[in-house]
Amino acid sequence: MISYEGLERALKEKEIGKTELSKQLGLSTRTVAKIAKGERLSKASIQKISDFVGEPSELLVREISDNKILQILRDEKEANLSGGLYHEIQVRMTYNSNHIEGSKLSEDQTRYIFETNTIDAGNGISVDDILETVHHFRAIDYVIDNAEEILTEDIIKKLHYILKQYTKDSTFSWFAVGDYKKRANMVGGKKTTKPADVHRAMEKLLNEYNKKENVTIEDIISFHAEFELIHPFQDGNGRVGRLIVLKECLRYNLIPFIIEDTKKNYYYRGLNEWKKEKGWLTDTCLDGQDAFKKLLDEFEIKYR
C-alpha cells in the first residue's frame, strides 16, 4: 500500500489543489485519482510532483507494508525511536547471535553500544567483538530495508560483507569478506561443502526455496539448516544465517525467532543432527518464536 500523506500535507501547505496539480504538470485525471486511492504512481510522475512542490519524493510518498511487524520496525528505525520493538530486536538479536559465536560482550554492554554509540566494554574485550556488534546493528537495518526483496546470493554476500568488513579477518586476502570461502572448513568436526562447489550448492538451495509458493516457518528453518550445512563463508555463517531467517520471516509475514544464547546447545544439536532428525532444530526455533511473541505482547503488538 502507498501512503501519500506527505504529498497531501505539502499540497495543503502550498494551497495547491489536485485539479491545479493535474493542469500544471499535465497529469491525467486517472493518475491524480491514484493519489486518493493509495495506488502506485510511476517514478516519472512522482519526480514531476516532487520537483513541482519542491520537496524530496521520499517525504511525499511512502510505501506501507501489509506486514505489521515490518512496518513498525521501519517506522521506529526511521524515527530513531528509543525503547521500542526495533530497539529491543537490535539489542537482543545482536547480543544472542554474537554470543553464540563466542563474543564476550554482555547484553548490557551490547545495549550500551547501541544506545550511546560509545564503548564501555571493560578489559578483555576484543576490537572485533565491538566491530561485529556495531556491524550486526547495520546488518539488521539492511534486513529491514530489504525484507521484501527476493532472497539472492548478492543479498547473502552483502550481509557477510556488512558483518565482517574492517575486522581482523578482512586483512587476509584469502578470507574473502563478502564472498564465498576460498579454503575448506569444518563445523562440529564435520566436512562442509567444498569451496569449488559452494556457488552451485547455494544456487540450487535458493532456486528450490524461492520457487515455493506458500513459505512456512518450517520452510525457513529448513533453509537455515541447509545453509549452515553448506557453510558458504570462511566464518560468520551462523550470524549470516540467522539474519537471513529474520529477513525471510519478515518477507513472508511470519513471526521471527531469535535463538537465545542459553539455548545454543539445543540449537547446535539440531543443526548437527538435521539430516537424521529435523524435530530438534524445529522445536528450538519454534521456542525462539514463542520468545519473540512474548516480546510482541510486551509492546501490545497484535499478531494473531
Image (cartoon, rainbow, N blue to C red):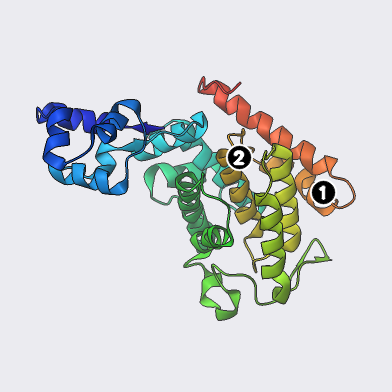
Q: Position of residue 124 (x, y in %)?
A: 55, 58
Asked which quadrant contains residue 213, the reply is top right
Q: Quadrant of residue 200?
A: bottom right
Question: Which residue is situated farthest in the bottom direction here?
Answer: 173
Q: Looking at the image, is 162 positioned above or below residue 76?
A: below
Most foreground residue, 235 or 102: 235
Disc on the earlier residue, 1 or 2: 2
Residue 79: % across, % down: 34, 36
Residue 207, given in percent of the width and then of the height, sits at 67, 57
* Residue depicted at 84% across the width and 44% down the height: 278
Image quarter (top left, top right, bottom left or bottom right) of the C terminus: top right
Is residue 86 toward the left or the right of residue 169 in the image?
left
Residue extending farthest right: 276
What amino acid is labelled 2 in the image?
Cys
Q: Residue at x 46, y 36 (%)?
A: 73
Q: What kind of residue is marked 1? A: Arg
> Vertical placement of 115 versus 130: above or below?
above
Of 290 and 56, which appears nearest the observer?
56
Label 1 residue SS: helix
Q: Is residue 171 visible?
A: yes
The local secondary structure at tag 2 comes to helix
Residue 32 image point, x, y percent:
25, 32
Drawn side of residue 217 relative to residue 59, left or right: right
Give residue 249's mark: 2
- The residue sitting at 64% across, 37% down in the picture is 257
Per the rendering, the mark at residue 269 is 1
Would residue 106 be seen by someone viewing this image from the given angle? Answer: no
Residue located at (62% from left, 27% from top): 293
Q: Residues within 10 Å of mark 2 (few under 14, many from 20)?
A: many
Q: Give the CA distance from mark 1 to mark 2.
A: 23 Å
